[in-house]
Image (tube, helix red, strand yellow):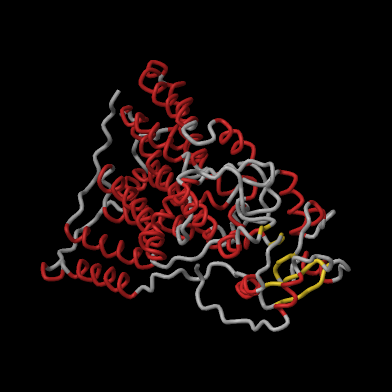
Amino acid sequence: MHERLPPQQQSWSNWHKALMALVWSIIFVISLQSYTDPDLWGHLRFGLDAIASGSITKVDPYSYLTQGHPWINHEWLMEVTMGVAWLAGGERGLILLRLIVYMATLAIVLWWLAGVKKLPFIPTVIVWLCVVAATIAFNTMVRPQLFTFLLFAITLIIIDRAEYGYYRGLWLMPLVVATWVNLHGGFLAGCGVLGVWTIAHLALNRHRWLQVAPPVVLSALATLANPYGWDLLRFLLETATGDRPEIADWRPLVVRSSLGLIYLAIVGLALLSVYFSTLPRRPILIGLFALVAVMPLLAVRHLPLMGLAFAIFIGEHVGVAWHQIIRQQRDVAIPRQLQAVPWVLAIVFIASGMFGFSWRFAPGINIPYNAMILLRESDFRGNLMNDFGWGEFLIWHLGPSVKVGMDGRRETVYAPDVYAEYINFHFGTGDWEAILRRQPTDAVLVAVGSPPANLLTIHPDWRLVFTDDESALFIRVDSTAAAVIEQTARSFTPREVALAFP
């Protein structure tokens, strides 16, 4: 069963290609700026550790609250990739890594729309810019999610082709999954969509099980191609649906926000396009888009996945609906001497961006820079409870001689009861100081004005020794290890933060 895709209405002219190159160059320049992420320091540190040791560390050396708990580092391959990029080019290498992966994702989407589905120019630009709008805010940082967006797009393309009867592409999925499972936990989304498609497709095409089932089963087995085997799957399935109220990316999409408007625009365009399209409406593909479109309402970090599903599954309907609504189209004759202008501008934009860009990370989060300098100059060696968003920054600069109490790895390295106690500490609720009693804690570094900072200020066992606009540093009054912090703080002069990274 190989159904021919319906012919599209028009091919691109050289003028259209030139305009697309100009649009691409503008998006490229906008995408140049990279921002720091709370986990950036940790990802790089752990990747460099793996490169130096030639193995994956399974026992954490950086926290005083992880003893006896395995470290399931499901992003180890991305961290090694970041380590290689850092060793090759420092900050420039990391930023280039981000740009290459993101531009590759956008290139695949454009190839699909213009090269495979052969949409006319304007609908292609509209759909492609919808993908840019849905993804660009989530691609400004060097994060493992970068590869999830790329591999999710590839997965959707394979599914779309298979739905039309081109099943050979399914044999690429085991390789995709085996790579993805070591890069980022987002492979669960890709495998979930593939699983739903398989069940629905075979329910309607039972005689096709021999073409579909073997590669899909092999893809499921490929999820075990990781250093932790089944333990990784069990861990992710247990934690993927958990609440993370302290992490903005895991909160539901706020419809009355800029990202919410993008979401509504894409959903609205999808509904209109499917309604006006004269193409056969594939219920399975439309249903898969609807499934992915629900995901941002559970966690805003899934908005890019919805944008990609819109382009891959609904994009061709946008092209046909455009033709149905705009029935009379006249090509404007562009003088030959002007047709090179967009190409020249594109080259100028890219060159000016590449050579004018500083190739440095801009601040993405507030960091306790001066408190870190104070701790380093005091030669403090002990246990430091901290805001989880600062944990990996502190690991990079002070670990492992200073052991942190929490960091962005959360459930991957901290036991559930430890993480639960930290949440109480972070929000100042319940027995908020239970985590400070679990193991001897010498010092606490938290944000100024935060619930734990306010509570520690009036606590008789803790003394404030340093504060600035970002952080408040407390020491336990009977800690001999923390005494050196107070001594150094008496003559410490805060400095201006010169760089955001490292």
Residue 344 picture location, percent across and down: 20, 70
Q: Residue at x 44, y 59 (%)?
A: 136
Q: Position of residue 282 (x, y in %)?
A: 40, 33
Q: Please state which of residues 431 and 28 is positioned toward the viewer in this rendering.
A: 431
Q: Residue furthest left?
A: 336
Q: Quadrant of residue 427?
A: bottom right
Q: Please tell me whether residue 408 is drawn above or below residue 258 in the rendered image.
A: above
Residue pictured at 51% horizontal, 71% vertical: 500
Q: In the figure, is residue 75 to the left or right of 465?
A: left
Horizontal and vertical percent for residue 20?
26, 60
Name the residue nearer the viewer: 142 or 263. 142
Residue 360 makes an appearance in the image: yes
Residue drawn at (52%, 59%) of the image: 40
The x, y position of residue 285, in whole percent, is 43, 35
Quarter where residue 458 is shown: bottom right
Residue 269 visible in the current orientation: no
On-image quarter of the N terminus: top left
Name the side, left or right, on which 493 lies relative to 112. right
